[in-house]
Image (tube, rainbow, N blue to C red):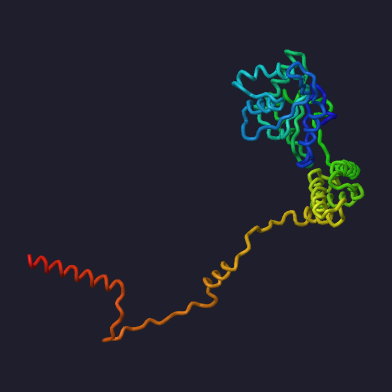
Amino acid sequence: MDAQFLPGNVHAVVAEPGSGKSMGIRDLVDAYTHTRSTISGRSYPVVAATAPKNDPKEAALGNSLMLAMNLSPHGRWSERKYVLPSVLKNYGVECFIIDDAHDLSMQYLILMKELTDQLRLHYGYPVGLCLVAAGRGAAVPLKDILDQPETMWMQFRRRLDRVQPYCQIASHTQEEVRDILGTLERIYHPYLPTLNLQRWSTAIYTWLTHPLLDPQTSGRVNMDLLMKLVTTALELSYAEGRQDVTEVALEAAAQLLMLTRDNIPVIDAPPTKKSQTTSKEETPTGPPISHPKRRRRAGVSQPETHSDLHSEMSEETVSKQDEGNFVI
């Protein structure tokens, strides 16, 4: 993305999910942000925003751009929209980066076209645009959209860079993995003083290019998988009180990442003794036992039940009432 950062150019950059797109955008914004501006003493040469997911209106993307420059989006969007180009010029914006560009709607693309056109037409200020999308393999999601025959897409496609309109970021090679491990050594040195990750670069590269983790057999390592493997191994080693990552911790992290990553553990509270006894008592172990009904013998008095007592009491009450009525 840094190589494609040129004022006035429009690029569509595609990378695999988990390859570090958002991390690279954040580093690029931090590298180009410095103090030189006519407003509040700050300048934002690179403004990055994420395409809103559930709001296709252009105001959603406009508010995201303003928040990226620490501006509060007060007032109506219909009024702020026409002031936004002058604000962008005063803040020294030279390039827009839109992350998750595969979620861009027609309204978002129209807004970006209007902003870049107005900055070039009214202020003679060309601004670059970098659309970063997620894709896998040779497919480029934005290319299918921008190749449509409508006039709007044709105008937007005409603004793409004439040499490299579409760029695809590949994952990391073995040498790049070694360099990344060296950087992680410096980051985690305060916690593991004798950390030496680079000596395990070949083993880590072999594990992460396994067909389970690299189904396309590209021979490259995904940044997300690399960070998961390394951080898990470092956590296991640190919990054991080690000062360097151990081979056992790396193998355990690789096994968790490769062999058991799709396992779904069942999390449940262990049954108590009382619940076990109750379940055994309630659950019959054999067929139910049928008891034969006892026949009522003639002349043998049976104990009176509650319903019989209730009926006799009601009959006595009625007879007393009848006797009282007869006396009256």
**Above or below — where is 163 with respect to 177?**
above
Query: Would you identify the image quadrant in which residue 321 lies?
Result: bottom left
Q: Note whether residue 152 is visible.
A: no
| Rendered-image quadrant of the N terminus | top right
The location of residue 312, given as percent across then percent down, is 23, 72
Quadrant location, the C terminus: bottom left
Quadrant of residue 125 within the rendered picture: top right
Residue 32 in the image, given as x and y percentages of width and height: 81, 26
Residue at 91% across / 43% down in the picture?
175
Front-lying residue, 11 or 186:
186
Q: Is residue 11 visible?
A: yes
Disc tally is 0
Q: Nearer the viewer, residue 272 or 1?
A: 272
Left or right, 64 with respect to 278, comes to right
* Percent coordinates x, y for residue 204 in the rendering: 86, 50
Residue found at the very far left of the displayed protein:
328
Q: Is residue 324 left or right of residue 126?
A: left
In the picture shown, does residue 247 fall above or below 89?
A: below
Residue 279 locus on image (x, y percent) = 55, 69
Q: Quadrant of residue 299?
A: bottom left
In percent of the image, x 11 and y 69: which residue is there? 323
Question: Going by the image, does 315 lie left or right of 42?
Answer: left
Front residue (pair 264, 26): 26
- Viewer-side residue, 197 vs 3: 197
